[in-house]
Amino acid sequence: MSAHTGPDVLDALRAAFGPSGVRVHASLSSYTTFHVGGPAEYLVEAHRTEQLIVAARIARGSQLPLVVLGGGSNVLVADNGVRGIVVLSRDREIAQVDEHSVRAAAGLTINGLVRWTVGRGLAGIEAWAGTPGTVGGAIHGNAHFRGRNISDLIREVRVLMPNGDVRDLPVHEMGFGYDSSRLQGSGEVALSAIFNVTPGKTDALRATARESLAFRKRTQPLDVPSAGCIFQNPDPARDAVPEGIPPSAGALIDRAGLKGCSCGDARVSTTHGNFIVHDGEATAGEIRQLIEHCKQEVATIHGVTLREEIVYLGDF
């Protein structure tokens, strides 16, 4: 990984984040749910939206990549690390806009959003209890759970454009699709979003949240590090899933006999075939190798090409 430790970049970052607020070649493993990965060239924490905007401006002026990390789920950081400025999004501001909407900052966890709305008797988000990651990450990948997308709940998204402008985009301009949004190819960054809510009864909302958490505990390996689902589910429009197999990546991996398969300390979960778990001292390279093995086996056995949901960061 090349280094850009010149005084201009460091001075600009330290002016914005304080002398101790900038780390050079800092490990990212503790900031991902996989608990693997190498260092960031520069690492800063943005506790306010204004700081994230400043970091983006510095990255643009220095011609460095900008990577924004929220909860660290759904990503795999290369063992060699990530070039450029990595911003840990920590703005957790949330406020009720009106009776039918709340604005949540990108750094707020989805669980934090659930707790806040449920505690105030606002319905709409409660079924997402237990979702890993942050509002920003969920928007970037259009997170899904039990047949619903996070975009179904959103009215508009405040976005930082590559030129430094801030725009409020209505949901129909976000390019949301299955596991996708316009942010994935535009260089834009989500700053906050307005979520639709309705008045509800707190006790009923808490019951729904508890049921969602119980479902996740029954069906997902929550007791060991993972990044969430590795692969997208097959698309019936272009993927010919063999008869008798549900159209899900986990089912295809299971029927291919891959549950429990391992590479080093990376292992396909025996609880859910679409999860790879870090069971000891795995490297990002081993996890990537196991992902490729699963893809190859499913293609050979079932004739279906799996597509990653997980995002690779850094040079593999």
Image: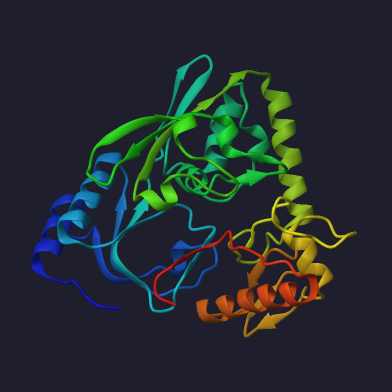
Q: Residue 100: x and y, percent?
A: 53, 17
Q: Which residue appears at 58% of the width and 62% of the height?
A: 227
- Residue pushed farthest bottom? 264
Q: Residue furthest top?
A: 99
Q: Residue at x 42, y 47 (%)?
A: 183
Q: Is residue 160 left or right of residue 215?
A: left
Q: Nearer the viewer, residue 151 or 105?
A: 151
Question: Going 35% across and 46% down the picture, which residue do you hit?
Answer: 188
Residue 18 showing in the rendered view: no
The relative height of residue 293 versus residue 128 in the rendered view (above or below) is: below
Q: Quadrant of residue 5?
A: bottom left
Taking the image as shown, residue 14 lies to the left or right of residue 187, namely left
Kindly identify the residue that appears in the image at 71 percent across and 25 percent down. Answer: 203
Is residue 94 positioned above or below 35 on the image? above
Quarter in which the N terminus is drawn: bottom left
- Give x and y (percent) for residue 144: 63, 45
Residue 250 appears in the figure: yes
Q: Position of residue 39 (x, y in %)?
A: 35, 73
Say which quarter of the image contains residue 302: bottom right
The relative height of residue 237 versus residue 287 in the rendered view (above or below) is above
Q: Quadrant of the C terminus?
A: bottom left
Residue 304 % position (x, y)? 73, 66
